Amino acid sequence: MTTVLIVDDSKLARIVIGKAVAALEPEWRRLEAGGADEALTVLGQQPVDVVLLDFNMPGRNGLELAEELRARFPDMPIALATANLQDEVIGRARAAGAAFVPKPITEDGLRDFLSGAALHLRRIRSDL
Amino acid sequence: MIRVRGDDTRFDDAAPGDLAYALPGGPGVWAWDLEAGRLSGDARFASLYEVDPVEALTGLPGEVFFRNVHPDDALRLRIAVASVAHGAEVFNRDYRLIGRQGVRWLSARGRAHHDLERGARRFSGILIDISEQKRVEEQLRIAQTAGGVGTFEHVEGFGTVTVAAQFCRLLGLHVAPALPVRTINGLVHPDDPPLIGPAPTELATQLELRIRRADTGEERWLAVRGERQRDTEHAGFRFIGVIYDVTETKKTEAKLRELTRTLEARVEARTQERDRLWNASRDLFAVLDPDCTISSANPAWKRVLGLSDEELIGRRFHDLVHPLDMPLADIPWPAFDGAKEPRDFDVRLTAKDGGSRWINWTVIPLDQAYYAVGRDVTERKLLEEQLRQSQKMEAVGQLTGGLAHDFNNMLTGILGGLDMVSRRIDAGRLDEAGRYIDAASAAAKRAAALTHRLLAFSRRQPLAQRAVDVNVLVTSMQDLLTRTLGEQVELQVSLDQRLSPALSDPNQLENAILNLAINARDAMPDGGTLTIETANSELCGVPGDDESPRGEFVTVRVRDTGVGMPPEVLARVFDPFYTTKPLGQGTGLGLSMVYGFVRQTGGDVRITSEPDAGAVVELYLPKAHVEAVERPPPQAAGAPQGSGECILVVEDDEQVRMLVVDVLDELGYHVEAVGNAGEAVAILESSQRLDVMVSDIGLPGLSGRQLAEIAREARPKLPVLFMTGYAAAAAQPTGFLGPRMEMISKPFEPDALAYKIRRMVED
Amino acid sequence: MTYETPLLTDLQVDALTELVNIGVSRAAASLRQMVGRQVVLSVPSIEVTSRRTAAALMTERELGPLVTVSQTFTGGFSGRAMLIFPEANSLALARAVTGDDLAPEELQDFEDEALRETGNVVLSNCLATMANMLRYPLEMSIPAVAREEASGLFGDDLGSTGGAVLFLYINFAVSDHDIRGYIALLMDLPSLAALRSVVSDFIVRVLEQPKSIRA
């Protein structure tokens, strides 16, 4: 059972992303959080396998959250979704070991990341 | 896909194999290996860039792309290419390339294929020579600006319209390449169709609409012309068109419309005015068909004659005319050739209550209809009649002097006769009384006849025109005229036996002739001859005077041998109240009345005169269009009778002598007739009673005039009547004749002789 | 009014126009992905003008109330990016970007969110592209949705120095929807000076690297 956490301040965006995820990985359990703090709370309560982060959020932005999560979960597949495709942003995301998903989110845009994440999770689990 | 500026940027990626093709005038193909920095192109590309085609195929440094680019365009081109490296998908640039043949405009279009991680990988496209297109565009731009024509293009379904700068300027908007449909339509007058409307059924659009300029708020008229074309890359339509300002045209149109509108209003007002005239006029208005059927009549008909539309429309005009005036109404109506202005005419119309009104009509023929205006002149007619009557009484007054004498003579005859009868009865000679009774009776009859004529003349009679036999009328007047003229004026009558009947009022005509006779008499204070002639004649009209009568007429010519008139008097003779007579002797209305009456019946009066050469007055009476004339009953008055007076007749022509003797005998005279002067002298020197001598002038031996001298020796007061066949002598009798001498022209009417003798006897 | 002093040279305006063009091309591509429809863009128009003139320009075109999605940006140059469209269009735009994901009654609740997300995608794409090409990173705020009349569009939240603005706008229209809008970049005078220097650097860089097109 794989659990994915979708973090976006926009409920609409969460619905859209959730639908795309459901289309690609129907078996996965989906959790949602409206911001960085809520995301950390969710993560403290239950195991999460994959995190999809919106870059542009009130409070801590997605990039900052990604860097923090990477420190706590070195192996967790993390993706940063943003329309802000500045070289800087992409560079920092890459440095934090987060995949880059351009907004607007589409199934095509998510497919590579999700399939990569699924493969990664299977490898970790088999290693265990 | 993305469309920029509405340009068609769709093209397929150029495959390496395409580079072998070179289409003259067609697009060149190029591909840019961004990793290696190598640019390759086909033969067309090489030709446009003026590089070796083989090198172009194998690959050139990328910098070649910017070589020879016009300095003003070089930077833009570099930026555009640099953009591709930073994620721009579409490359689309127009720029100038300076070649050996001169400057040409090129359009390079391409597409980059990106890899998010590594940037642009592949960049290829086409190259088109658009020099011609640029030139045309420039021409178009100039044409648009100069012609004030603004182009636009709208792809169905989009909220904005691609527009030219001139389009924005025409709407008073800031220049922008695209404008919202709502913005454009928002400027259009609410009552007008939208400039960019919903998809129409027809492909071509032609509109005219008002807009309120965004900058000044001014209202302008725009014309929209456009076509809908099926969009090649889109399921719908593309609406391409132009707008231009037609405010001035519209203003001119509006001005014209206003003119037309006010013209209508003016016409309406005029029509109203005319309606009011039509409705309010006291004159009768009617429109009649060419056959004189009334097709329209105004309310005055109701007021004047009590006749409503229902009683008028469809009726013939003539059905309304008083039967007595029918001949007048039958005068041919004016022709439709419009050649002459019609004269008016007076007829009585029968009113609904059975009465009648005199209406003066003016009829104008126009457009196959008669336009008739009738004025009620009944009151005027009454006044005229009264005036005519006074004229007549004036004439009667003038007659009275002469008539009184006649009457005295007649009374003398009667009284004398009665006295003789009385004496014979006293003497018991009753058998002789019959003669005197007869003589008295004859005198009384003559008096009665004269009185009858006088009364008939002075009787008040309404004007009534009808066909008149003028000869009969003149003949019947002879007695009266003779008495009126006096002894010094001889009356001669010459009648055309084939005379046509005239259309006139006999009473008025009598009056006119009498007036003329009196005038003539007054013009001959020393005596003379008055000639009355009748004849048929024809008038051609007076050139230049459309109103002068023309056609067939019956002429009555009254000629005198009087003092005549100078031209200045002649010019005024028809003026009312103009007279040359001493105060109290004439009203001056005589000739003007004659003129008025004759003109009124459609005739004419002409007068010619010279000082000391007499005057001729001609009455032209219109010919009556009737078959037969109803002749008035013969006048009762006969020639004046003699009463046994003794008359010596000297005439060498036996037949003439016999006739004269028979006439005088019949008239009641005792006649002694001789054939020469010698026999006459014997009787003259005898004691035999002689009252008058009648002598031919041209006698054998002694002339008639010499005989008269001898006669006067013996009987100084004996009246002498000369008979002559010489017109010249008769024409100038004054110097020839002595006192109590008269002359009669041969041939003469027995009655004329009777009058002459009678007058001489009675004097 | 338009300022007579040329704050930007013709070449700078050209370069900036091209940059914006690329930025909005990306933005339009994003929008196209969101609405699944053809999107038409006008060539960007760049003008240094007063806010009042800029507002008048919008007032002239748009009569009714407008919806704006704004994002401020700071960095090598600063200002505010705005996505502007008629309020009458906003529900249609929200529906277009959400597609069949939402029921109509849900859409009502998510309208503003949908607009903000749309604005975010469009404006971020545009600004990011420009930042990348100019090589000056930009910090972008979270987008804010507002409804206002055209006349009040360019309020004075740009500070006391904001007498003049770089008014850069571009029309866009979405096929088969009565959706149209404008993208505007507003910068005050100090930002304008910064932008000028940034653009100059860009021009120099482009011209100094003739051998390679890799920027």
Image (tube, rainbow, N blue to C red):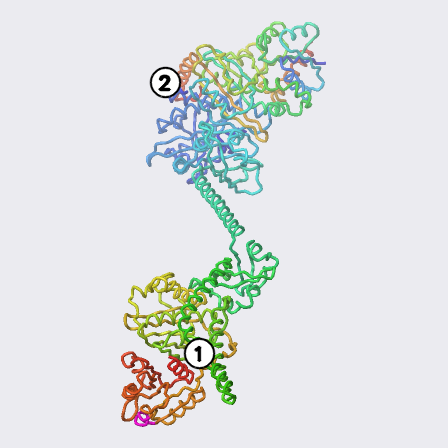
B680 inside magenta stretch: yes
Mark 2: few/some/many CA within 10 Å (<14, 14-19, 20+)? few
The outermost residue toward the front is B427
- The spot of residue C113 in percent (x, y) is 62, 17
- The spot of residue A39 in percent (x, y) is 65, 8
- The spot of residue B551 in percent (x, y) is 42, 71
Q: Are marks 2 and 1 on the same chain?
A: no
- The spot of residue C157 in percent (x, y) is 50, 12
How many numbered marks have been drawn onto this rendered protein structure? 2
Residue at image coords 43%, 62% = B341
* Chain hosting mark 1: B
Q: Is residue B384 visible in this depiction of the protein?
A: yes
Label 1 sits on a secondary structure element that is helix
Q: In this rendering, would A3 be left or right of B697?
A: right
Q: Is residue B319 above or below residue B271?
A: below
Q: Is residue B43 visible in this depiction of the protein?
A: no
The residue at which mark 1 appears reads as B412
Quarter holding residue B622: bottom left
Q: Is residue A101 above or below residue B147?
A: above
Magenta stretch in the rendered image? B675-682
Q: Amino acid at mark 2?
A: Thr
The residue at which mark 2 appears reads as C5
Please name whichever residue, B152 or B455, is drawn nearer the observer in this view of the structure. Answer: B455
Q: In this rendering, would B181 be left or right of B255?
A: right
Q: Amino acid at mark 1?
A: Thr
Q: Is residue B156 above or below residue A30?
A: below
* Chain hosting mark 2: C
Secondary structure that dominates the magenta span: helix
Q: In this rendering, would C86 be left or right of B469?
A: right
Please name whichever residue, C166 or B210, is drawn nearer the observer in this view of the structure. Answer: B210
